Image (cartoon, rainbow, N blue to C red):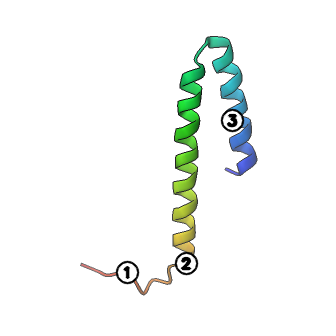
Amino acid sequence: MENKWYSVYALILGIVSFFTGEIVTFIMLGFILMALININTTLKKNGQHSDGSNNRSL
């Protein structure tokens, strides 16, 4: 997914959480989503920079 879809997804969750009264849950899910996006981005960068020479077979 691209970053714009994350924003759309967050907006939909925000609207739903406002009407259901689950604002704190929305905030916590936002923190989790940001952490997962950062982990995903880091893993993608590491995958692009590795050339296979650092991999060791057991």
Q: Position of residue 2 (x, y in %)?
A: 71, 51
Q: Is residue 33 left or right of residue 58?
A: right
Which one is nearer the viewer's eye here, 12 or 28?
Answer: 28
From what the image shows, is residue 45 above or below residue 17? below
| Callout 1–callout 3 Cβ contact below 8 Å | no
Residue beneath label 2, please? 49
Residues at marks 1 and 3, CA–CA distance in whole angstroms = 37 Å
Crowd class of label 2 (few under 14; some 14 to 19; many from 20; radius 10 Å): few
Camera-side mark, 1 or 2 = 2
The residue tagged with tag 1: helix, strand or loop? loop
Relative placement, left or right, of 5 versus 58 is: right
Q: Amino acid type of disc 2?
A: His
User: Which of the two discs, 1 and 2, labels the residue nearer the N terminus?
Assistant: 2
Mark with earlier residue (2, 3): 3
- How crowded pointer 1 is (Cα within 10 Å; few <14, some 14-19, many 20+) is rated as few
User: From what the image shows, is residue 38 above or below residue 18?
Assistant: below
x, y percent for residue 20:
62, 12
In whole angstroms, how far apart are the C-alphas of marks 1 and 2?
13 Å
Residue 48 is situated, as x and y percent measured from the top left of the image, at: 57, 74
Dividing the picture into quadrants, the one containing residue 18 is top right
Question: Residue at coordinates 32% horizontally, 81% vertically from top-left?
Answer: 56
Towards the viewer: 8 or 14: 14
Residue 9: which disc?
Answer: 3
Q: Residue furthest left?
A: 58
- Towards the viewer: 18 or 1: 18
Three-letter amino acid code at the position of disc 3? Tyr
Q: Residue most toward the bottom?
A: 53
Above/below status of 13 relative to 9: above
Residue at 52% over, 40% down? 32
Residue named by callout 1: 55
